[in-house]
Amino acid sequence: MPTWGEIIDEIQEAQDTSPSPFDRVRQKYLEKVADETGREVLLYSSGWTELDVDSPQFSITDTDVQGFMETISRVDSDELDLILHSPGGSTDVAEQIVTYLREKFSSIRIIVPQAAMSAATLMCCAADDVVMGHHSALGPTDPQMRIPTKTGQRWVPAQTIVDQFNEIDDKIQAGEQIGHYTPILSQYDPGLKQQAENSIDLTNRLAEQWAEEYMFDSDSNAATKASNLSSYLSNHTNFLSHNRRIGRKHLKQNTPMKVTKLESNQTLQDAVLSVFHAVTATHSHQQHTKIIENHNGDLYGRRVQN
């Protein structure tokens, strides 16, 4: 398997070719993945680990739907391998993407070359199987909410908001003074607690529904396994940080998620990680925040917006 540095050398050697050497090398290894699996191959990669710009540009957003439409509109097979590298983003858009992909493909395998966090982990619950390396990670699915503070907008776990409101309610019921909470409450919209509860409910419902229908579809205990998976991933107290990485071993020990070792097929591992090295080089050298691409050369990309 070529290392990241060897991939860079290969790109530099292809400088005088057309299309761009980055596209050319990336496409070469996407084709190798397809040759090995015999399935449609789609890459969705965000430059969040390579570029130091505003995080919303890396998130799962509405524009990604256009990218998926562009790259799977002409596919023939109903079996898909999705190589996914993302920090997460909108739960609503993740739902739209999953619905679209599941309309097109009867079998979806998600391959995580490094990390698929938050809403990207939620998407993994809609896969038949998740393929991870020793180094790969998913993340907690507990939803985050953007709230105003004295120092500006801040992302806070929805469960933390609910817990804080419940704590205040308990103190009121006990007849305790809550004057010291006034500065905090003055920043919150009156409906914030309900919004937080709705956000938690939606995330749990989607993960459970998808896992039962797809990942555990032939399992007699599908409903129980799906519920256990959803509950574990969305429980903030299990992880304490929304950015906590959940490795393959941890998932196998604590959840029923179907996880396959990337290392079990050395040829596939070499091809997948070569794709990943090539796409991270594209992010860092060409300032691409997003790349969505199939093994046939159909490409949708977005660059850094100033």
Image (spheres, rainbow, N blue to C red):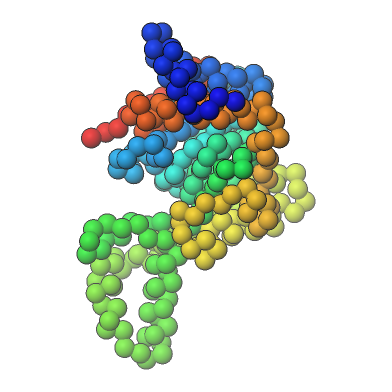
Which quarter of the rendering shows the C terminus?
top left
Q: Residue at x 42, y 76 (%)?
A: 166
Could you tell whether 21 is left or right of 138 in the image?
left
Question: Is 52 above or below relative to 247?
Answer: above
Q: Residue furthest right?
A: 220
Q: Residue at x 42, y 61 (%)?
A: 157
Q: Residue furthest bottom?
A: 175
Q: Residue at x 61, y 40 (%)?
A: 133
- Residue 182 visible in the shown view: yes
Q: Quarter-wise, where is residue 221 in the image?
A: bottom right
Which quarter of the rendering shows the N terminus?
top right
Q: Quarter-wise, where is residue 33 in the image?
A: top right
The spot of residue 31 in percent (x, y) is: 57, 18
Q: Nearer the viewer, residue 97 or 7?
A: 7
Q: Residue at x 40, y 26 (%)?
A: 282
Question: Is 269 above or below relative to 92?
Answer: above
- Residue 127 visible in the shown view: no
The spot of residue 47 in percent (x, y) is: 40, 35
Question: Is 159 above or below relative to 34?
Answer: below
Q: Nearer the viewer, residue 248 or 176?
A: 248
Q: Nearer the viewer, residue 19 or 159?
A: 19
Could you tell whether 254 is left or right of 83 in the image?
right
The spot of residue 93 in percent (x, y) is: 44, 42
Q: Residue furthest top?
A: 17
Disc tally is: 0
Could you tell whether 71 is left or right of 214 in the image?
left
The spot of residue 126 in percent (x, y) is: 59, 43
